[in-house]
Image: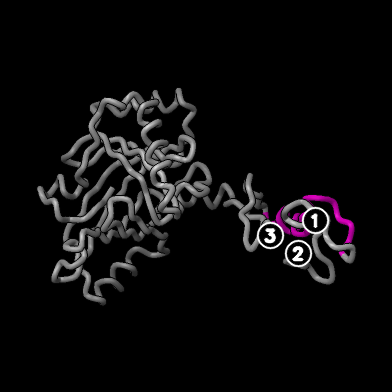
């Protein structure tokens, strides 16, 4: 494997730390040829580097202004990255008590005072819900952020992505034959505790809930994630609470075939 090249020279060290071939310039370990450009653009490196093909590549974090435009208080990092999600939902009486416990744990606020409207879409024959999946466009206020989410059929399967324009997305999906079958609105705060995210929800007509979740692309890691989610639940003093098995939409409609949502 050759080191990554920059113009006529390459980094002075391999990603593993061994000295590079002698033809390379003798540059100091950790040399970043793009540092001046990053400083000019006002971006910073994340604490860790991702690796691609054995070569360490620096990944820049979002600037504070970019985060603020999306209603974020901190960079989410990999918290919402992954095809699989371990999620536990619990019914509670008092969200203010949960906020106090999160503060005591040193939880990091991600979004506060968020209002989310979930628009559930399906084809005329209802085939998505019948397959145990949910297909959702989530509109957030005040940030204006829009998420496109597919969950199921397994309880831990979740794919999501940001969309630049929710109105156009609805128009395009409608043109493809999708129709709105339901919607729900909730007030949501999200905090980070380790590699878990803790969501405090107040759902219209249903009340207050706490969700603790973590995501991964590695299906074999779901067992370890489930243990970490359970540990956070215990730290919140909710270890004795039975998890809620039905989605918000199922609880609102009385149906158990609507697919997953959160």
74 over 233 or under it: above or below: below
Quarter in which the N terminus is drawn: bottom right
Nearer-N-terminus badge (2/3): 2
Residue 154: name its quadrant: bottom left
Residue 246: name its quadrant: top left
Q: Is residue 30 magenta?
A: yes
C-alpha span from label 2 to label 1: 8 Å
Q: Which residue is mark 2?
A: 3
Question: Secondary structure under badge 1?
Answer: loop
Q: Which residue is mark 3?
A: 55
Q: Is residue 189 visible?
A: no
Give the camera-side residue of 256 and 36. 256
Say if mark 2 contacts mark 3, CB within 8 Å: yes
Say if mark 1 contacts mark 3, CB within 8 Å: no
Magenta part of the chain:
24-41
**Which residue of the protein is positioned furthest toward the bottom in this rendering?**
175
């Amino acid at each position: 494997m050759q080191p990554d090249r920059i113009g006529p020279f390459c980094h002075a060290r391999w990603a593993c730390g061994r000295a590079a071939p002698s033809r390379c310039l003798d540059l100091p370990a950790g040399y970043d040829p793009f540092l001046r450009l990053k400083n000019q653009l006002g971006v910073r490196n994340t604490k860790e580097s991702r690796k691609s093909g054995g070569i360490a590549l620096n990944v820049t974090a979002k600037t504070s202004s970019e985060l603020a435009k999306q209603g974020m208080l901190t960079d989410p990092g990999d918290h919402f990255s992954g095809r699989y999600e371990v999620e536990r939902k619990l019914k509670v009486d008092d969200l203010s008590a949960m906020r106090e416990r999160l503060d005591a744990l040193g939880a990091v606020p991600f979004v506060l005072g968020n209002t989310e409207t979930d628009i559930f879409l399906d084809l005329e024959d209802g085939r998505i819900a019948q397959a145990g999946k949910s297909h959702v466009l989530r509109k957030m206020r005040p940030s204006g952020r829009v998420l496109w989410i597919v969950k199921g059929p397994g309880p831990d399967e979740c794919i999501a992505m940001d969309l630049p324009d929710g109105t156009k997305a609805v128009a395009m999906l409608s043109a493809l034959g999708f129709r709105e079958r339901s919607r729900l609105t909730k007030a949501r705060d999200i905090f980070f505790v380790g590699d878990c995210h803790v969501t405090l929800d107040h759902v219209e007509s249903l009340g207050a809930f706490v969700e603790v979740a973590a995501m991964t692309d590695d299906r074999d890691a779901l067992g370890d994630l489930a243990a970490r989610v359970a540990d956070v639940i215990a730290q919140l003093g909710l270890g004795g609470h039975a998890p809620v098995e039905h989605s918000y939409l199922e609880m609102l409609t009385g149906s158990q075939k609507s697919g997953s949502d959160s």
